Image: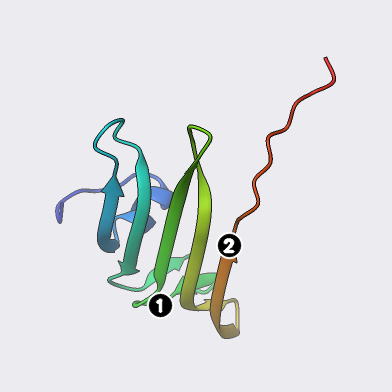
Amino acid sequence: MKNARPKSRTARLFSKFSGKAWVTKTDHTLVKVEAELTEDFNVGLFLFKMYKGARIEFESTLVDGLWLSQRQSFDMGMRALWNTRRTRTEIVYSQYQKFTSGK
């Protein structure tokens, strides 16, 4: 919604993303997200800036009836104070094991 005025910094950040989300038909669980930053996002005058075009992806997988993280991917240009960098990170989760306590 273009005229929305988010109150929190997190809500302002998410309002600048555009993308797709996948949910399950049965329980409406969010299982995949692909999003791209449509405009630069600033925190303070020069503290932090994330540049337009940043991409994030999240995927979940069903393990023993639970939706668990399978993959997270971040590709972004950013500046923190005077340090500018490009970051590409992918985290893949696998080999889940059920944990039981001794009680």
The mark that comes first in sequence, 2 or 1, is 1
Q: Nearer the viewer, residue 27 or 58?
A: 27
Measuring 14% from the left and 52% from the top, which residue is drawn there?
Answer: 3
Asked if the residue under mark 1 is in contact with the one under mark 2, i.e. CB atoms within 8 Å, the reply is no
Q: Nearer the viewer, residue 36 or 38?
A: 36
In the depicted structure, whether residue 31 falls above or below residue 27: below
**Residue 100 seen from this side:** yes
Amino acid at pointer 2: Val
Q: Taking 16 as reference, is 54 above or below it?
A: below
The kind of residue on which mark 1 rests is Tyr
Mark 2 lies on residue: 92
Where on the picture, by quarter, is residue 24?
top left
In the picture, residue 41 is in which quadrant? bottom left
- Side of 39 where 98 appears, left or right: right
* Crowd class of label 1 (few under 14; some 14 to 19; many from 20; radius 10 Å): some
Disc 2 and disc 1: Cα gap in Å?
A: 25 Å
Instruction: Find residue 100 and report its horizontal and vertical position in percent.
Output: 75, 26
Query: How far from the left and from the top, in percent, is residue 42?
Result: 43, 68
Q: Is residue 24 above or below residue 43?
A: above
Residue denoted by label 1: 51
Q: Is 28 rendered above or below residue 41?
A: above
* 92 horizontally vs 75: left or right: right
